[in-house]
């Protein structure tokens, strides 16, 4: 508990509230805590000059070891990785084409994307594709896509196909990665896999993705950066984009070193022990929140199949007196700010993710929840009505400099 209090005092010195992130690895909340060895590696490189291309060479070898890829490259985030990989599919290692983008005249410049994978994670997948100068060809419907639709879309002007593996996407009715990759391989079309927050990178490449894009600050708990891992020639073409549209997306020396350290720590970690610790903390959360009238608890395995679960807090407003959305918003008003996942609050539940919080922080989350459940019912509240995440984000932007 002392550590939590000291941390909050440090935030107050800047005039801002601290955050207890029980929502997940969203970048808007800082994604993950870096392990001490990662923080030490970043701090050690900061006072020094370095040949960044040499550092990228070391990173490539580390990425290959961690993912099973032939090579790897570090950019400044996974969203940038989508744009860079799309550009690489269009230009290869032709520097005249690299310099021409986003003017794609004379190049294959269509990118195929299943409609159910056109999601918003702070920006849309299609916008990251279009940043490279490509055109998006959506296939299927929001909840269904078939092999014949993909085959029909893979015309001569297609440079690549993008596949998104995420809890944000539709989880049924679409083509699985193996089928999607096999059809694209038949036509010689590279598959760019956006798997920013996912875990099983080696299996993804073995399933058929040409490259997989990973967010360093999510599963590996590193600094903000993106990893592009996969076939050597394709990764080399991604590196060439640093002389083109990838220039404003380049990774810093500290991001590259932090990525190396985070992946080394990931490879050395006892993952079964970590998963057991997370499961025990989830059980503890469930025990602490049990026997509250109007609150039903359910353990939800991660939708894309990563090896962890979240605790679903089903809110019955007829019993508790408040909606799930209002409760989630009220949690963010205190100091420290407590964040639960409100993505499905309109469906009556919040999600509690314990992977990145301590037991002491869990105590604060539960104490805050119990206090709000006692105080909120019966008080006037204009926030009972669900507000979409985009509108909440817009409000935050409008207030940012006021």
Image (spheres, rainbow, N blue to C red):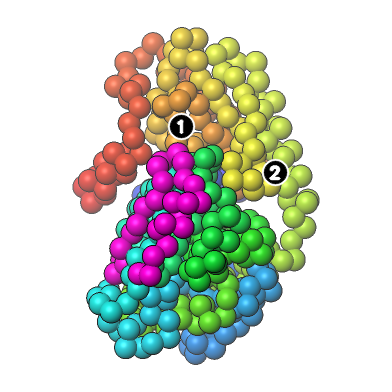
* Image coordinates for residue 226, horizontal then vertical, percent: 49, 66
Q: Residue 146 in magenta?
A: yes
Which of the two residues, 1 or 143, is positioned nearer the viewer here? 143
Residue at 54% across, 34% down: 351
Q: In which quarter of the image is residue 391?
A: top left
Residue 215 is at least partly visible in this image: no
* Mark 2 crowd level (few <14, some 14–19, many ≥20, 10 Å Cα): many
* Image coordinates for residue 360, horizontal then vertical, percent: 63, 40
Which of the two residues, 30 or 84, is positioned nearer the viewer here? 84
Count the numbered circles shown: 2
The residue singled out by tag 2 in the image is 278
Residue at 35% across, 61% down: 128
The residue singled out by tag 1 in the image is 344
Q: What element carries label 2?
A: helix
CA separation in Å, label 1 and label 2: 22 Å
Residue 191 is at least partly visible in this image: yes
* Image coordinates for residue 273, horizontal then vertical, percent: 78, 51
340 versus 371 height, above or below: below
- Give the residues in magenta: 131-157
- Residue 15 as seen in the image, left or right of residue 19: left
Q: Residue 150 in magenta?
A: yes
Q: Is mark 1 on a helix, strand or loop?
A: loop
- Residue 328 as seen in the image, left or right of residue 383: right
């Amino acid at each position: 508990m002392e550590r939590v209090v000291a941390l909050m005092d440090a935030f107050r010195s800047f005039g801002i509230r601290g955050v207890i992130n029980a929502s997940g690895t969203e970048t808007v909340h800082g994604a993950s805590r870096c392990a001490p060895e990662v923080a030490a590696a970043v701090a050690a490189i900061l006072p020094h000059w370095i040949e960044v291309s040499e550092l990228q060479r070391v990173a490539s070898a580390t990425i290959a070891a961690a993912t099973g890829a032939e090579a790897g490259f570090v950019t400044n985030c996974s969203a940038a990785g989508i744009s860079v990989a799309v550009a690489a599919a269009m230009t290869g290692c032709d520097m005249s084409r690299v310099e021409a983008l986003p003017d794609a005249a004379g190049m294959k410049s269509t990118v195929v994307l299943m409609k159910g994978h056109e999601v918003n994670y702070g920006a849309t997948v299609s916008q990251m594709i279009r940043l490279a100068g490509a055109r998006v060809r959506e296939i299927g419907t929001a909840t269904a896509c078939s092999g014949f639709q993909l085959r029909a879309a893979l015309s001569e002007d297609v440079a690549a196909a993008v596949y998104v593996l995420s809890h944000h996407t539709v989880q049924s009715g679409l083509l699985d990665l193996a089928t999607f990759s096999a059809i694209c391989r038949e036509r010689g079309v590279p598959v760019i896999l956006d798997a920013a927050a996912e875990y099983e990178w080696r299996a993804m490449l073995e399933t058929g993705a040409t490259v997989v894009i990973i967010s360093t600050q999510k599963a590996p708990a590193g600094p903000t950066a993106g990893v592009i891992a996969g076939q050597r020639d394709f990764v080399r073409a991604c590196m060439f984009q640093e002389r083109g549209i990838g220039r404003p997306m380049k990774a810093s020396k500290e991001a590259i070193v932090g990525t190396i350290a985070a992946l080394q720590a990931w490879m050395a970690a006892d993952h079964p022990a970590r998963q057991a610790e997370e499961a025990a903390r989830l059980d503890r959360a469930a025990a602490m929140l049990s026997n509250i009238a109007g609150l039903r608890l359910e353990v939800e395995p991660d939708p894309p199949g990563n090896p962890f679960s979240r605790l679903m807090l089903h809110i019955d407003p007829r019993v508790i007196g408040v909606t799930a959305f209002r409760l989630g918003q009220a949690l963010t008003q205190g100091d420290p700010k407590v964040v639960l996942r409100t993505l499905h609050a309109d469906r009556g539940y919040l999600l509690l993710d314990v992977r990145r919080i301590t037991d002491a922080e869990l105590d604060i989350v539960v104490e805050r929840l119990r206090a709000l459940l006692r105080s909120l019912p019966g008080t006037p509240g204009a926030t009972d009505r669900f507000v979409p995440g985009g509108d909440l984000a817009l409000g935050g932007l409008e207030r940012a400099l006021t």
